[in-house]
Image (spheres, rainbow, N blue to C red):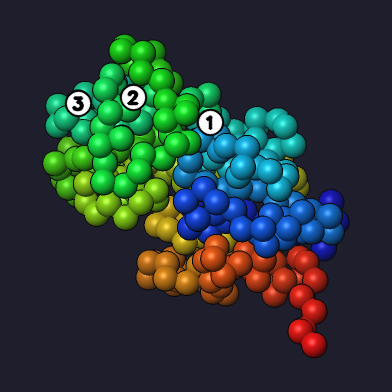
């Protein structure tokens, strides 16, 4: 592996894309960086099943998905961690008892209780098409092996829900939308994006010093702490900004392309004449 090679991990929502739309400058930057011999992966809280072709069109070396629980690199699954059966059932029971709307996220699809599609459509914001397209509602969810839960419409605040579920899981505010204390993401304790990144680093035989991480949300804190070079998006929470070596604009400002150029992964754009 070339010593000059870098591996860039890009958060999706609010970093690489804006509500699923990928700026041309970002797609071009990914192609150029890979053409220069660097590796580029998406590093997202979404499961792989919620990564539509439009997000993948630029071409990537792989994905760290479901907030670090799943990793695919060069077409090979190198990491796939899911909730143990007993814990999975207990978490679902708690959410059902509070009438919380939730998605069980897996690489193959996302699953939810019967009627979840209607609750998604009834939200004030438009129901994300990429959720509805892969949503399955089989009625009996006991056999679903999932890696993460995204939930909304919770009458229980995050802190209280965290206390009720116990130390085997962690909860973060939702990375999909700013919905306050009524929405969040439930993951296995100790599992986060840096866990998946470490699997990539080990598989490639490189060091974290060769890693670039770019993100904007609470679930990116560990990613940026792990990366040799951490890039935060303007307006990110303070915990994210505290890890940053570099700050760039969001998708509308071509922040990923700016970061790649400033870090030498692609050439700097020629000055206007």
- Helix, strand or loop at disc 1? helix
Earlier along the polypeptide chain: callout 1 or callout 3? Answer: 1
Q: Hey, which quadrant is residue 75 in on the image? A: top right
Above or below, 190 against 267 in this view is above
**Taking the image as drawn, is residue 7 in sight?**
no
Single out the mark in the foreground, 3 or 2.
2
Above or below, 237 against 143 in this view is below
Q: How far is disc 1 from disc 2 in space, using C-alphas? A: 14 Å
Quickly name the residue at label 3.
96
Q: How far is disc 3 from disc 2 in space, using C-alphas? A: 11 Å
Quickly name the residue at label 1.
49
> As rendered, which of 126 and 130 lies closer to the eye?
126
Q: In which quarter of the image is the C terminus?
A: bottom right
Q: Hey, which quadrant is residue 105 in on the image? A: top left
Q: Disc 3, disc 2: CB below 8 Å?
A: no
> As rendered, which of 98 and 7 lies closer to the eye?
98
- Helix, strand or loop at disc 3? helix
Above or below, 259 against 227 in this view is below
Quickly name the residue at label 2.
112
Residue 210, how many percent across, how many down? 71, 60
Above or below, 200 against 81 in this view is below
Q: Disc 1, disc 3: CB below 8 Å?
A: no
Look at 67% across and 58% down and name the residue there.
24
Single out the mark in the foreground, 1 or 3.
1
């Amino acid at each position: 592996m070339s010593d000059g090679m870098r591996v860039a991990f890009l958060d999706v929502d609010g970093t690489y894309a804006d509500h699923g739309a990928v700026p041309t400058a970002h797609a071009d930057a990914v192609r150029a960086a890979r053409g220069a011999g660097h590796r580029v992966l998406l590093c997202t809280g979404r499961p792989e099943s919620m990564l539509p072709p439009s997000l993948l069109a630029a071409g990537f070396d792989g994905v760290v998905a479901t907030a670090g629980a799943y990793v695919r690199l060069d077409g090979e699954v190198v990491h796939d961690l899911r909730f143990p059966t007993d814990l999975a059932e207990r978490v679902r029971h708690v959410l059902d008892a509070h009438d919380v709307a939730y998605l069980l996220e897996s690489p193959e699809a996302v699953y939810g209780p019967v009627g979840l599609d209607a609750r998604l459509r009834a939200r004030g914001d438009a129901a994300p098409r990429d959720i509805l397209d892969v949503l399955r509602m089989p009625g009996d969810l006991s056999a679903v092996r999932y890696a993460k839960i995204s939930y909304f419409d919770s009458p229980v605040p995050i802190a209280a829900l965290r206390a009720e579920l116990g130390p085997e899981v962690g909860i973060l505010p939702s990375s999909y939308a700013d919905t306050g204390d009524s929405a969040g993401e439930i993951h296995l304790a100790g599992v986060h994006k840096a866990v998946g990144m470490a699997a990539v680093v080990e598989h490639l035989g490189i060091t974290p010093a060769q890693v670039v991480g770019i993100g904007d949300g609470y679930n990116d804190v560990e990613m940026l702490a792990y990366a040799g070079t951490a890039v935060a998006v303007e307006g990110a929470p303070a915990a994210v900004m505290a890890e940053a070596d570099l700050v760039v604009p969001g998708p509308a400002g071509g922040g990923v392309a700016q970061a790649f150029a400033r870090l030498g992964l692609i050439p700097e754009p020629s000055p206007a004449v």
